[in-house]
């Protein structure tokens, strides 16, 4: 049975609005400026509904863990989370598709809650609700102008990715070639093709993470760039995603060559945030 994602987004909106209304009732005369959805959990093939925090004036900007007002998951929210988790395992949809719908619903709910609360005059005129996570999730909750204001570092990274994504692959390849981008030699312990043939079923999470880290987080590229093995592994072990993300840094990354450009550009639209960010970094490393 398909999920009604519109209804889910409306539920998220209502949860945020209710959290803010309760905050205002407990703090008469206080008009909050920010609300945050945080602690999103989509690990281990289990979805948990996040916490909603509301900031008092003067509390640290976008540090929801430190805000006094915290609304934990309600019973209705828990039922939604259980429904989505069950749907992901039912065969009706793959895990990445459900995660995509979950994230889209969260972001849509944030946007709708911001508009409704500002219209109600319960909050400050500049009030905004944001789901905190990766850059794409944050940006999905805000207008470009508000993103620049609230999260300038996120806006800058997305601007760079957008410029890369707009480059036509053939032209991009010529640019890469002109920059004399080199291909790494075969010194990594696991190549992309080898990773695709390895059965990780008997590996511990730490061992699987080490196998992935070689080809995707090493300093030398071993073979033609491909994200298919990584997508398979993340589908089987989504709990590894956040651990991979925490290791990803633009300071240590190999360059790509012209033949890799179409794969990297296409990966900017991946359903996995790690893959999108990895692709953006390797493209930027090519001095485009």
Image (cartoon, rainbow, N blue to C red):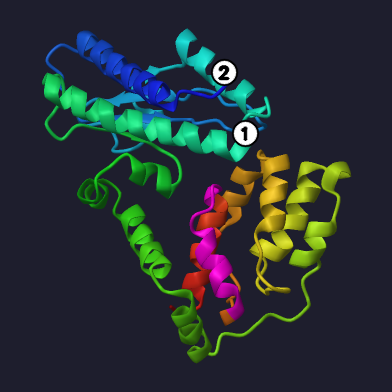
Question: For residue 20, which quarter of the picture?
Answer: top left
Q: Residue at x 65, y 69 (%)?
A: 225
Query: Relative to the observer, which residue lies in front, 7 or 235?
Result: 7
Whether residue 23 sits left or right of residue 43 in the image: it is left
Q: In the figure, 273 relative to 106: above or below?
A: below
Whole-percent x, y for residue 28 in the image? 15, 11
Q: Nearer the viewer, residue 90 or 58?
A: 90
Q: Dividing the picture into quarters, in which one does residue 129 lie?
A: top left
Quadrant position of residue 22: top left
Classify 21 as above or below 199: above
- Looking at the image, residue 272 sits to the left or right of residue 203; the answer is left
Q: Residues within 10 Å of mark 1 (few under 14, many from 20)?
A: some
Observer-nearest of 158 and 68: 158
**Mark 1 secondary-structure assignment:** loop
Task: Return the x and y of residue 8 as percentages of the image width and height.
Answer: 42, 22
Q: Residue at x 69, y 80 (%)?
A: 184
Residue under pointer 2: 83
């Amino acid at each position: 049975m398909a999920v009604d994602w519109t209804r889910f987004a409306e539920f998220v909106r209502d949860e945020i609005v209710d959290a803010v209304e309760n905050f205002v009732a407990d703090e008469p005369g206080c008009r909050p400026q920010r609300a945050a959805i945080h602690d999103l959990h989509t690990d281990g093939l289990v979805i948990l509904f996040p916490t909603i925090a509301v900031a008092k004036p003067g509390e640290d900007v976008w540090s929801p863990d430190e805000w006094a007002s915290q609304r934990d998951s309600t019973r209705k929210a828990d039922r939604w989370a259980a429904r989505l988790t069950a749907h992901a395992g039912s065969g009706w949809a793959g895990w990445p598709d459900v995660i995509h719908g979950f994230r889209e619903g969260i972001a849509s709910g944030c946007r709708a809650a911001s508009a409704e609360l500002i219209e109600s005059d319960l909050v400050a005129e500049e009030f905004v609700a944001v789901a905190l996570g990766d850059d794409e999730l944050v940006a999905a909750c805000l207008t470009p102008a508000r993103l620049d204001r609230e999260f300038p570092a996120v806006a800058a990274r997305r601007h760079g990715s957008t410029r890369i994504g707009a480059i036509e692959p053939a032209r991009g390849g010529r640019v890469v070639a002109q920059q004399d981008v080199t291909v790494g030699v075969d010194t990594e312990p696991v190549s992309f093709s080898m990773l695709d043939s390895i059965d990780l079923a008997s590996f511990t999470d730490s061992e699987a993470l080490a196998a992935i880290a070689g080809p995707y987080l090493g300093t030398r590229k071993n073979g033609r760039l491909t994200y298919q093995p990584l997508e398979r592994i993340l589908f089987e072990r989504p709990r590894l995603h956040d651990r991979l993300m925490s290791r990803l840094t633009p300071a240590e990354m190999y360059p790509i060559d012209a033949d890799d450009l179409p794969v990297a550009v296409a990966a900017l639209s991946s359903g996995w945030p790690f893959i999108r960010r990895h692709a953006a970094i390797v493209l930027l490393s090519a001095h485009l």
